[in-house]
Image: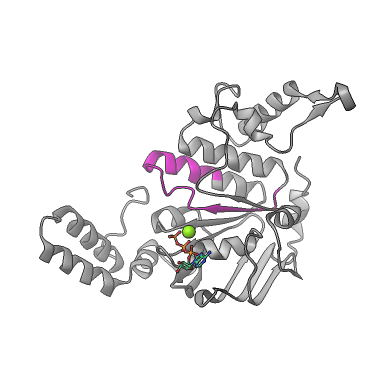
Amino acid sequence: MMTTNESELLAHPPAPLMELENVGKSYGNIIALTDVSMAVDAGRVTCVLGDNGAGKSTLIKIMAGLHSHDSGTFKIMGEERTLRSPREALDAGIAAVYQDLAVVALMPIWRNFFLGSELTLGRGAFKRLDVKTMKQTTKSELARMGIDLRDVDQPIGQLSGGERQCVAIARAVHFGAKALILDEPTAALGVKQSGVVLRYILQARDRGLGVIFITHNPHHAFPVGDRFLLLKRGKSMGYYEKKDITLAELTGQMAGGAELAELAHELEELGGHGELVTEVQAELDGKSGTAPGDPAAT
Ligand SMILES: Nc1ncnc2c1ncn2[C@@H]1O[C@H](COP(=O)(O)OP(=O)(O)OP(=O)(O)O)[C@@H](O)[C@H]1O
Ligand SMILES: [Mg+2]
């Protein structure tokens, strides 16, 4: 059940749910993150953007208790912490949903929803699963998020990637998460399915969760984000409130105009990549502000 009193949270905004200040992390002699600062508030979506190897996963692994940071400070509700395990993160109300969702494909949706937190009836030798309540709860929690699945008895493996992400989000909300980390939830999805996931990100936000949305796609981040952290090779390239940046600027910042121009040139020289060149060119035009593009166009 939700334990947080949402209205109270909104009426008296406390310290940010999470706050990172100059956080750094190395793996041996590989510096994965340096001096990264960001905040996560209840009822807000903080987006972390960056290309492959930018340090996005490293950053969220620190928040999810999979890795510990080795410099800077990480505060949860104003209190400095170093998480030692995913369990510690969960106890602090931080839930993470990864791209490769840990679901048991052949098990029904409701079993996956309650996986590891099964409801039971009776004691000792008479202990048994409370199937009825679990099914009902799964159905009603999904409905509350606006997810209408015909049958919670269906194996979860039959759901689309987008629907599975949505079930995972609803699950985190149900089990009382205060902060929800989504690592590239739309990366493997088509336009329509991405739209569905983006809508549930907003649902989770509206239910008072602080959402951390990791993506390399500014077209997915911009419509749902309140703040944007741009990472590049482990460093922060900027941290913006939505009012301070446009989609075109975000796209341009992400790609780096000069690098794009160079890429377009290289592709042209290689020949036979007409479409790609056009796409890169469109992105470049977007940067100069002439064609910001359709938010759903990727
Ligand atoms: N366990 C690890 N051991 C050593 N190096 C690592 C480890 N995890 C990540 N790195 C390195 O740290 C850097 C940041 O990686 P990270 O996975 O955080 O990037 P990312 O932004 O999530 O990339 P992607 O978009 O590909 O998922 C990379 O150079 C990567 O090779
Ligand atoms: Mg990653």
Tally the marks.
0
Left or right of 272, for residue 234: right
Q: Can residue 219 be seen in this view?
A: yes
Residue 40 image offset from top left, x and y in percent: 63, 63
Q: Residue at the location (76% across, 39% down)?
A: 1
Residue 232 percent coordinates (x, y): 43, 71
- Residue 59 lies, with reference to residue 145, above or below; the image says below
Q: Residue at x 54, y 31 (%)?
A: 105
Left/right placement of residue 257 relative to residue 186 reads: left
Which span of residues is magenta-colored? Answer: 177-200
Based on the picture, tell me whether residue 179 belongs to the magenta stretch.
yes
Q: In the image shown, does 147 or 113 lie closer to the viewer?
A: 113
Q: Is residue 77 left or right of residue 172?
A: right
Q: Position of residue 145 (x, y in %)?
A: 61, 37
The reply to whether residue 123 is visible in this rendering is no
The residue at 55%/25% (across/down) is: 155
The extreme right residue here reads: 123
Work out whether 152 lies above or below 224. above
Above or below for 139 versus 235: above
Snapshot quadrant of residue 170: top right
Write down the quadrant of residue 258 in the picture.
bottom left
Where's residue 6, x and y in %? 74, 49
Q: Looking at the image, what colour scheme do you see? A: one colour
Indicate whether residue 193 is drawn in magenta: yes
Q: 75 or 205, which is in the foreground?
A: 75
